[in-house]
């Protein structure tokens, strides 16, 4: 084997090892969740927000041309949201600004990721897959607040699922 071939082989081996270590570091040390595709559940057809525990919510997000349902969600500070995303028509994207959430919204499929909001503020989300004429209008926001009035107005779901 040529010397330069050995070098290339050695370097690619080292790179693979580095990527693998980075993956383990992200999962174990940083606790970064990897989005999951759920294939054994029928996709939902209506958007819903359930409270499943104190500070824990389950959000069924529907994407369609060209909107998110729901397009606005208000939740208290410290909420963990179990996000389930599907599409009613074609492939869309779902990305929350400033959060490690970047999902595909695929028809007949559900993608899942949990996300926790410890800081109050408005978290903008948008479609990041080009999906037609009004793709650029496909956006919404998650409002995280500790203002009792805003939360009361948001009409949070109190019941069990
Ligand atoms: Cu939906 Cu772009």
Image: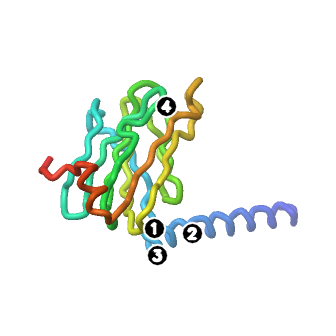
What residue is at 26 percent from the left and 62 percent from the top? 148
Q: Is mark 4 within 8 Å of ligand 1?
A: yes
Q: Which residue is mark 4?
A: 91
Measure how far apart labels 3 and 1 are at the Cα level.
Answer: 6 Å
Q: Check if mark 2's residue and mark 4's residue have beta carbons within 8 Å.
A: no
Name the N-terminal-most of marks 2 and 3: 2
Q: Which image quadrant for residue 111?
A: top left
What is the secondary structure assignment of the residue under circle 2?
Answer: helix
Q: Which residue is mark 3?
A: 29
Q: Check if mark 3's residue and mark 1's residue have beta carbons within 8 Å.
A: no
What is the secondary structure assignment of the residue under circle 1?
Answer: helix
Measure how far apart labels 2 and 1 are at the Cα level.
Answer: 9 Å
Measure how far apart labels 1 and 4 are at the Cα level.
Answer: 28 Å
Q: Which mark is residue 61?
A: none
Name the N-terminal-most of marks 1 and 4: 1
Compare residues 148 and 2 and report the one nearer the observer. Answer: 148
Q: Position of residue 134 (x, y in %)?
A: 56, 27
Q: Badge 4: how crowded within 10 Å, few (<14), some, or many (20+)?
A: some
Q: Is mark 1 within 8 Å of ligand 1?
A: no
Which mark's residue is nearer the viewer, 1 or 4? 4
Q: Badge 2: how crowded within 10 Å, few (<14), some, or many (20+)?
A: few
Q: Which residue is mark 2?
A: 22
Which mark's residue is nearer the viewer, 2 or 3? 3
Q: Position of residue 159 (x, y in %)?
A: 12, 50
């Amino acid at each position: 084997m040529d010397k330069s071939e050995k070098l290339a082989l050695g370097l690619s081996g080292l790179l693979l090892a580095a990527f693998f270590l980075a993956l383990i570091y992200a999962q174990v040390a940083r606790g970064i969740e990897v989005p999951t595709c759920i294939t054994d559940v029928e996709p939902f057809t209506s958007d819903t927000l359930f409270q499943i525990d104190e500070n824990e919510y389950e959000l069924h997000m529907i994407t369609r041309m060209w909107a998110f349902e729901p397009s606005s969600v208000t939740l208290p500070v410290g909420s963990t949201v179990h996000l389930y995303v599907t599409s009613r028509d074609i492939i869309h994207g779902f990305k929350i600004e400033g959060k490690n959430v970047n999902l595909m919204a695929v028809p007949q499929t559900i993608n899942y990721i949990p996300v926790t909001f410890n800081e109050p503020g408005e978290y903008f989300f948008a479609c990041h897959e080009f999906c037609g004429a009004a793709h650029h209008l496909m956006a919404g926001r998650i409002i995280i607040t500790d203002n009792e009035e805003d939360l009361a107005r948001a009409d949070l779901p109190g019941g069990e699922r």
